[in-house]
Each structure stands twice: as structure tokens, then as C-alpha cells.
Amino acid sequence: MDRTAQIYRDTNETKIQVEFSADGIGQADIDTGVGFFDHMLNGFARHGLFDLKVRVKGDLYVDDHHTIEDTGIVLGQAIKEALSDKKGLKRYGSCILPMDEALVLCAVDLSGRPYFVMDGVSFFADKIGDMSTQMIREFFYAVSYSSVMNLHIKILSGHNDHHIAEGIFKSFAKALSEAAVRDHRITDVLSTKGSL
């Protein structure tokens, strides 16, 4: 089964193309117009072993909000489509990831019910490079709801904004990768209901 997706979004604020493969090797080709965001998406692809292509033309003359939030929406849609019926998937994944002094916990449930919690985040600056730190929360909220996953992110420690942000994206990558693994013992979906 080919676990890939190509999603396009075209609005007055953004034009976005995302190609996503859940069974990749960590190759990334990213151009959002926001350098630090590109760096984070590259890390997500590499550490999750996803193949990811992202092209965004956004209204950056306004700010980075629409570009980053809408990319989260489209990436979430691509994840949802690529993992589709979820048969045979482990469904749950988690990671506690150290990034120098930062320590980040991320847990994922591919439940088909969107829910998002992000605790312990306190960035010290308004921006990291050219990316607004408040957009990190908005990005993951958009991913969780458009992919209909339950996503929890908790910052356990950290005082360097770059390290905290990188820990968030990498821990999400590892948790999602684990949740998306096929287990031959699971012949349907992993739920007592029989569906997700």
C-alpha cells in the first residue's frame, strides 16, 4: 500500500503544495519563505524518516501567520490521507527528546478524534530567526485538527528558544513515526470499537 499524499491549497492568503510519504528515508525539499520554519520542517522529515516536499507562497508582507498555520493545515491533511484507514498501525507513539538543555515530551494518538494540548512552553523571544515563536503552537494545533490526531506536547525543560523549538519538531517526528508503524499482529484497526 502506497502511503503517500499530495495536497494543494489555494487561497487569497497562501498557495501551498505538500507531498508527504510516511515510508520515506528522511528526504526533504522545503521552501516556505520562512527560513527557520524550513529548518524545522527539514528536521521533522529527517528524524521521522518521512519524505516531504513543501512549497508555499504566502502573504509574508503581512506576517508569517497565514504561511505557517496554513502549512500546518495542509501537512495535517497529507498525513491523514497517507495513513488513511489506519489498519495495522500501532496508532500510539511517544518520544521524550533531549536537545541540549531542552527536554520535550510528545505523544500522538491517531485516534480519528482531534485534540491538542501544549504545556510548559515559554519562549523568551518573539521570534527565532524570521519565525514568530507564537506560531509554533498555531502550527501544531492546525496539524492535529486537520489530521484528526490527538497530540500532546510538553516542554519539560529548556531556556534556549532554538533548542526548545527544534526539540518540539523532532519529538513530534519521532512520535508520529512510531504511531504510523505497521504491526503484523494488528489485522484491523487498534480499537475495541472496530473503527477509528
Image: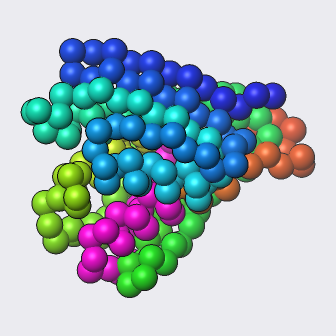
Q: Which residues are magenta?
A: 149-172
**Looking at the image, is 67 positioned above or below residue 24?**
above
Residue 141 screen position, x and y as percent: 35, 44
Whether residue 44 appears in this view of the structure is yes
Which residue is situated farthest in the left direction here? 62
Tell me the quarter of the picture where residue 193 sits: top right
> Where is the C terminus found, in terms of image quarters?
top right
Tell me the quarter of the picture where residue 63 sits: top left
* Residue at point 27%, 15% (across, down): 11
Residue 10 screen position, x and y as percent: 34, 15
Residue 86 screen position, x and y as percent: 70, 35
* Residue at point 27%, 34% (across, down): 67
The question of residue 151 being in magenta is answered with: yes
Left or right: 187 in relation to 150: right
Whether residue 147 appears in this view of the structure is no
> Where is the N terminus found, in terms of image quarters?
top right
Tell me the quarter of the picture where residue 4 sits: top right
Q: In this rendered view, identify the residue nearer to me: 61 or 182.
A: 61
